[in-house]
Each structure stands twice: as C-alpha cells, then as structure tokens.
Image: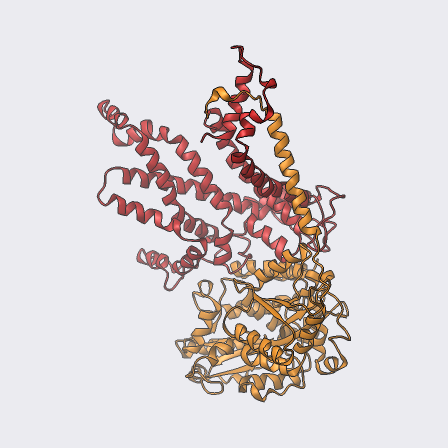
Amino acid sequence: MRNPIATLRNRWSDSDARADGGEPASTRSFFDRDSVRSAPFWLPPFLLVGLFVYGAVVWNFLLSLTDFTGIGEPDYTDLDVENYFVAFADPVDGLLSTVGLGGEVQGGSPAWSELTVEPVWNSLGNTIALMVGFAAICLALGLVLAILVDRGIRFENTFRTIYLLPMSLSFVVTAKFWLYMYNPNTGLINIALGAVGIGPVQIVQNPDLKLGAVAFALIWQFSGYAMIVYLAALRGIPSSHFEAARVDGASTIKMYWRVIIPQLRTATVSALVVITVFALKAFDFLFSMYGGYQPGPSADILATRMVREAYANQNWAYGSTIAVILFVMALFIVAPYIYSQYRRGEL
Amino acid sequence: MSSDMNDDGLSRRTVLASAAAAGATGLAGCSSLTGGGTETDAGMSEIELLHAWSSGDGNAAIAALIEGFEEEHPDVEFAEEPVNGAARGNLDQVVSNRLQANDPPSTFQTWPGATLTKFGDAYADIEGEVWTDDLKENYLPGPKAQAQLDGTYVTVPLNIHRINNLFYNTAVLEEAGVDPESLSSPADVVDACAAVAENTDAVPFAQQTSGPWSTIQLWETVLLAQAGIDGYEAFIGGDGDVDQVRSALENVVELSEYYPSDASSISFTEANTMVMEGDAAFIHQGDWAAGAYSGDDEFNYGEQWGQVTYPGSEGSYLLNMDSFPYFDNNPSPEATKTFLSYCGTTDAQVRFNREKGSIPPRKDADVSELNAFQQDQYDDFTSADSQPPSIQHGLAVSPEIKTNITSAFSGFLEDYDADATAEALVGAFE
C-alpha cells in the first residue's frame, strides 16, 4: 500500500489539473470518496498516533510551561516560559563552560523551588559531544567495515554476523559488560594497554575519559548497524560502476572516494538518523554503568538530568522542559532527512 | 489504489484540522487520567502494598511480616505487589505516577524522614489511630522524629539498618597487627589501613566507587565521627560548617588511597566479597553487609569477622529505616490502618527484622530470636545517646537537596577535590 501522505499530495496536485470534463467531485456522495472509503485502514492508526505521540508531545510542552511539582493537578491557567529561562540561564558562562573555558555558571531560582536550579549547559554540552563523536566515528567505522566485507572476503557471513551481534544486546548488558572491560586489574582494555606499556588506567570514573569510554562502548555496539546499512547500499550500486572506474584507470581508493562513496548519501543520512537517536537514548547505558542517574558531571547527559529532575526532585515541569529540549534536538536531526526525502519525492 | 480515483479534493487543511482534533483528543484523554479519582467506600477492601523487596532477604522479610499479619487478622485481604526491578527508585516512580493519576496504593515501602516531603501533601495524619501512646512510648526519639512530617505522624518505621559500622576480617587484621577496638577516630582508620597495606597483601579498605552512594555513606559517617552530633545536625539543618565538611572529605580522600585499584568497576557485592575471602581488611557499610556474611557457614561473627562502631562515632546510631506511610484518599482506609498498627507491634518487627538482618525500632522488643550480631546492634541502639538520620538513605534531607548532594559526590568521585566538593555540599541547601 502506498504512503497515505503521498496519496494525499497527489490528490492536491491533481485537483487543479482536471480538464477532462466528467462529474465534478463536489457532487459525488461523501461516502463514495476514496479517503472516506479507506478510512477504516488509515483512521485508527492516525488517531492512535495522534493521541499517544503528538498528543503526549503537546501535553509535555504545556507541562513545561507550568510550575507542576508532581502532586495534584498542574495549573494550566498560569503558563510562562520561566523554565526555559532557568534551563538556559547565564548563557555566556554556560556556553563557555561547555567548551571548557568558562567559570562558574549561575543557577536560576524559579518560583517552584526553594533551591537554586542549575541550567542545562553541562548536560547539553555532553549530549552534543556524545552525539557528534559517536555518530561520526560509528559511520566512518561502519563504512570501512562495509567496504571490507563487500570486497568478497572469505567467511563474509560470519564477519557480518560478528559485527552486527552487539546490536542485538540491550544497553544494560553492554553497560555491565564494558564495566568489566574497563576494570583496571582484569579488564581487557587495560590488559591491551598494558601490552603496549601504558597503564593501568582508571577509566570509569576518570573525568577525562568517562564520556569517551561511553562513546567507545556505544560505537562497539552500533557500528555493525552502520555497516549493514552501508553494505545494503553498496550491494545496490551496479557493478558496471566499479568496472567503468577500473577501465578508466582509477585506483581502489580513488574508485571508492570518487565513484562509490558519493552514491551512499541516502544510506548515510538514514544511518545517521538512527545512530544519533541512539545517542540521545544513552540513558539506559549510563544508568546501568553508574548504578543510577548520577553519572557525574563529565558524563551527565540531558536524558539523565531529565529523569533526575522529574523523578528524584519531583520537578515535573522542569523535567518536561528538558524533554522539550531533547525533542527539539531530535527534530533538528530528523528534519533535514525528512526534508531531503520530501524533495526527492520519496515521501 | 490508482491515482485517477483521487478526486475527492481532500485538502491539506482538512488533514491539519483532523490532526489538531486528534491532538486535542489526546490532551483531553491525558487530563482525564489525572482528573478521575477512584473512590472506594468499603473500608475493609483489600490492602494494596507496593514494595521493591522482590528478592533475597527483603522478600523473605516481607513474606514473614504478611504471614504474621494474616495469622492475626485473617479477615483482611492482601494484594501485595513487588514492583519489579527491585530498586527503590522504580518504586517511587510507580507511586509518583499513581499519585498523579489520583490512584494511590494503600501503602508502600519508603524511607521516612525528609523523604516524606516528596509526596508530602498526599499523606494523612495517623496519630491516635495508629500512633497510639504505646508506640510513642516505645519508639526512641530518633526514629519517632523520622515518622513525622512537619510534626504530624504519617508513617510507621519498620526496621533500622545502621550506617556507622566498620566491618573487618579478623585474620587480615591479626596479620597486620591492628586491634580494631583500639581505633578511636577516622584518622586512626587511615593509619590502620596503612598498617594493613604494609604488613599484608590484602586491600585495606574495600569500597565501590562506580556509583556515589557508598562514598556518601562513608563521608556522612566520618562527618558524624569528626564533627560530633552537633556538627552533623547543623549540616543537615542547612547550617553546616564548611571546614568540618572539608575535613571529613579530606579523610575520605586519604582513605581512597587504600581502596581496591578497581573500585570504580566493582559493585558493593564484589567489595564485600573481598572481605569475606580475606582479600580486604575493612569495609564500611550499612549492616546489610552482615547479611551476606551470615549466608556463609565458614565466616562467622566474632570469629572470622567482627564489627565496631565507626571509630569516633560511638554513642550515635546512624539510622537508615524503611517505613509504611498512610495515604490520604486511601483505597482501603480501615484495613491499611489495621496493617500499619500491626507493623508497629514488636511481633511484626521481630518477624520482619529476623529475616532482614536489621533491628526493630521499638525499644521493648524481645530480640532473643535475632542472631548474635543483631542482638549486639540492638544493645548499641537502645543505649545510644543519639539516633541521627542518614543523608544517603533519605532521612535527613529532602529529595531535592539529596540530589544536589549526590551530584556533588558524583563529581567528587571523578577528581577527589575536597575544597570544591565541600563548597558544593554546603551550597546544596541553597
């Protein structure tokens, strides 16, 4: 079945171009309309998604404008953007501190709290660093693995399975697993470092390595996914392109760089979307690794901060505010993808 | 479906309008979730008890408690529900969601004290009906204060775990030439650790640092030992002396030199096992650590392991308690009160604590059924000059302040910067 939105768009563009006479649409019975007759198919999911996804998003946004602190009814009559001012308080110091140059960030004192409330700069910075670092390396590694596997190596299926396997594990399992891996005495990472004369290194609570260690574990888990997406795209490129490049005398590197990789744009964008969304969801990983939602300032991300505000502090409105910030970040990632799909007429 | 049938002119505006309508429906649905209350008039309907004791000694303890209750009150139905995931945090989230939906359980497992402020308005006064003169006479002042929210009795403490313990492996200390009874201050513990490091191959001080909770416990114990009960109470009252706080942190930094080298990668269980296997000399923990020892026949109290009050904190019994509060808008008012009254009896508390490894909060309990270690702890408790509340275990400070303190310690674990952490801890109350 075709995408319903595409169908709707075709109708929109078709309606003006109708010049073949025939019965005008308006005179036909309402119940004969195609959209009405197909309603049993599209209406239930449409309403369910409207209610449980978009309804919840809108409700969460409204909640972020209140002063709700968990008990009783949120007061929807007194809406303001105070929470956003608190979240982004002291922007100059905040932005400087995310790149390691700033001093003290001053917290805000909103009406709903007797205590000073910290802005989100630190966790925002960590979230972006994790997202960018993780996504870039994950894609690069996935591409390299895909090209290697695509070169017609022996045991191709075995390698493909090995690389993809970590993705089937849950974050809880991988977090506990990497806690062992990073152990200074018995962990494989430190044994490997020891073999080249480094270490043993404290990793799990080391402020300089913490976030990197988390990103590394996530890369281990998800580069296999990037590989599969790239591999599928590589398989879709006709072998004549490879042959033509060869005939023209291109080296292997040049052939990939000039001919093959430029054709992987769609694959890159779709893998990127999924992978960055995984980075936003790294909450489970941090929760399992640090035994709670207090991973420490060097690895605190928006998701851990959000849960802390909402569930530990009962600052539901402020938690919702952080959720909206996360939602907007996710939109920024997904929107270009949807737009490019739209431009290519695939939506 | 072919495109030549698409002639009904369904416009984007229509689509938008229906999307908006769907959104509005969503909102209406959500608000009705929080609006509707479930009223029950049958006072003796079944008790819905939510707890996170879904395994181990906690599960055995709650089962023993409920068994005792059902023997005494066979007419009251019970719908006990462990919230899986076993963590108290998950339980709080469930209760929080239930309260938002105006559908509280009869009671649930919670820390008393300042943690009660989290759902403050949702609790109701049970003085007189549950908190009778008998309870008031037989709870010591410390636990009694923790049962109250702003002077109103709302909850019944069920057990007490002590935080200011120092457990040790006897053989390791003998080899190191350290007499635990001779230690009289937190600084002495550091010296003893140095002696262990010098004279044995064991790790002097078993500790986990992947999560901040063990370090907060240790610091609050050291603060109590160094600054005394007055300094400790000043801190939890928001009026702490930054020098005392820093001094306690500096002692923890010194101790951290004697942690296992993989402290950041291990859990409490692994750290405690090091003591049991003779790989570590000391561990500072709540007395649940002893629960693990009692499961090992080769590792006995007074022989292979021992416990002293954390040096310097003698005379104080640093409290960690669980309790069952009473919700206003209770689904089973009479039954819940009957159950809470039962929890306040010595019979209930002995049954529960025998399995849990903690001690009864009532001073008149017959503890002869408890093990030797518990009996010693109970003697310490009833003869203690003060029973201060634990910060880490939610009694001393409100959840929001506790989050700030935990954040400060999650930073402390990264860099062990006593100055910055001391400022953050005193600032946690602002």
Please say if B176 is above or below B250: below
Give the chain ID for the red colour.
A
**Is residue B119 among the parts visible in the rendering?**
yes
Residue B28 x/y as whole percent: 68, 43
Q: Residue at x 59, y 58 (%)?
A: B407
Give the chain ID for the orange colour.
B
* Quarter occupied by the C terminus of chain B: bottom right
Q: Residue furthest bottom?
A: B368
Please say if B228 is above or below B418: below
Residue A41 x/y as whole percent: 51, 35
Please say if B80 is above or below B134: above
Frontmost residue, B349 versus A1:
A1
Please say if B374 is above or below B15: below
Residue B74 x/y as whole percent: 63, 77
Q: Residue at x 71, y 83 (%)?
A: B138
Q: Is residue B182 left or right of residue A271?
A: right
